[in-house]
Amino acid sequence: MHGTRVLISGASIGGPALAYWLDRHGYEVTVVERAAGLRPGGQAIDVRGPALDVCARMGVLPEIRRRSTGLRGMSVVDDDGKELFSTTERTATGGDIDSPDVEILRDDLASILFSAGGSGIEYLFDDSIASIAQGGDEVAVTFLRGARRSFDIVVAADGVHSGTRAMVFGPEEDFLRHLGVYLGVWTVPNYLELDRWQVIYRTRGNTWGGMVMSVRDNTEARVFIGFHSDEPPTRLLRDSTVSDRKRLVAEAYADVGWEMPRMLEYMWGAPDFHFDSVSQIRMDSWTRGRVALLGDAGYCGSPLSGQGTSMALVGAYVLAGELKAAGGDHTAAFAAYERELRPYMTANQDFALSNKERMDAMMEQDPATAGAEALVDGPADFQEVINSLTLKDY
């Protein structure tokens, strides 16, 4: 494998994890990221099942646990702030408090994975892939800033709206399955003085409601909102600015109660505001020639799966491992990557669809009379799906 050059597009979760493993397997690794540095903000995400094993093998699991959200529990409130439900056994985002799973902010996990890779990995920030031309022996890549280089393998780990995937596999519309929901996330001061606590504001109808949770030892809080819209992401997101997206959130939540008006005020000045569709990527193949897809770029499960981060971590470990096992033969390695992971990724995607049906049914009920505890009672087969894959040793 020494001398085999791999370019990875994307430096969020899957990209740095893959870079770590490939570097240790003897590959020459370059990661290109269009942002000027590691991107701030994002959701609270979860490391579960075999992904915990991946992180343990990387030696980063203790640090991930140290920087976890550390929530003690959650409550559900109505328009007036009246508590409808409270528990110290579970949270809506992290599941059972006493489980081995770890909930951590996306940007914190990205920072840990980036640091774990070490100095042997080349990072190109503030740049991206402008064009790809595959030949028999290599991939010719032109970067947006004008540089031209050749690689033996290219891996797209640049998210659900992957530009690299579009260049090689075709337009996003061919693979993206919009689930009818949009999600917004931003940081606010912890003015509610939450102590490692999560509060869900329960609504009914078009808006899924708001949620706020204290993070980073209660020094700040993250706000999450969702609302229904069948507008395709290719139309709603492609030509919209950050201000346009903030305006959509403000309009969707114009008439709601509790603390949402104040949280919306903070949204306008939030530099880490993130807004995207709740969607899946479904593809018949994750590889073409010398190009492979990793994580959300190839098999996004959507936030409704609760498994997007774990899927990316597991995918990175298996893809790197199969390349090592095949002695650098990308054709054999890519085929093994698909065989090993497709049933697992599909099961997680299917779980997200059943979870959406459950959540949609909940949103149709009156918050004053519905059992708010159902918001955190996940489907019984969740752990079975999570733990249905056993990692190979490479």
Image (cartoon, rainbow, N blue to C red):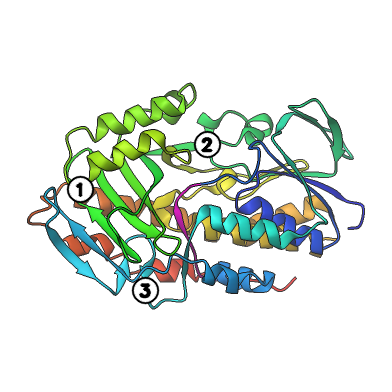
Label for residue 363?
1
Q: Nearer the viewer, mark 3 or mark 2?
A: 3
Cα distance between the residues tagged 3 and 2: 35 Å
User: What span is in magenta?
Assistant: 41-49
Q: Which mark is residue 175?
A: 2
Dot placed on the residue nearer the N-terminal end, 1 or 3? 3
Q: Earlier in the sequence, mark 1 or mark 2?
A: 2
Look at the numbered disc 3 and give the secondary structure of its residue: loop
- The residues bearing labels 1 and 3 have C-alpha atoms spaced at a distance of 25 Å
Q: Position of residue 186 (x, y in %)?
A: 40, 44
Q: Is residue 156 visible in this depiction of the protein? A: yes
**Element at badge 1?**
helix
Q: SS for tag 2?
A: loop
Q: Is residue 81 left or right of residue 379?
A: left
Residue 321 point in image, percent of width and height = 74, 63
Query: In the displayed image of the protein, which residue is found farthest to the bottom?
Result: 98
Give, as a three-letter code, the residue at label 2.
Phe
* Residue on which the image places disc 3: 97
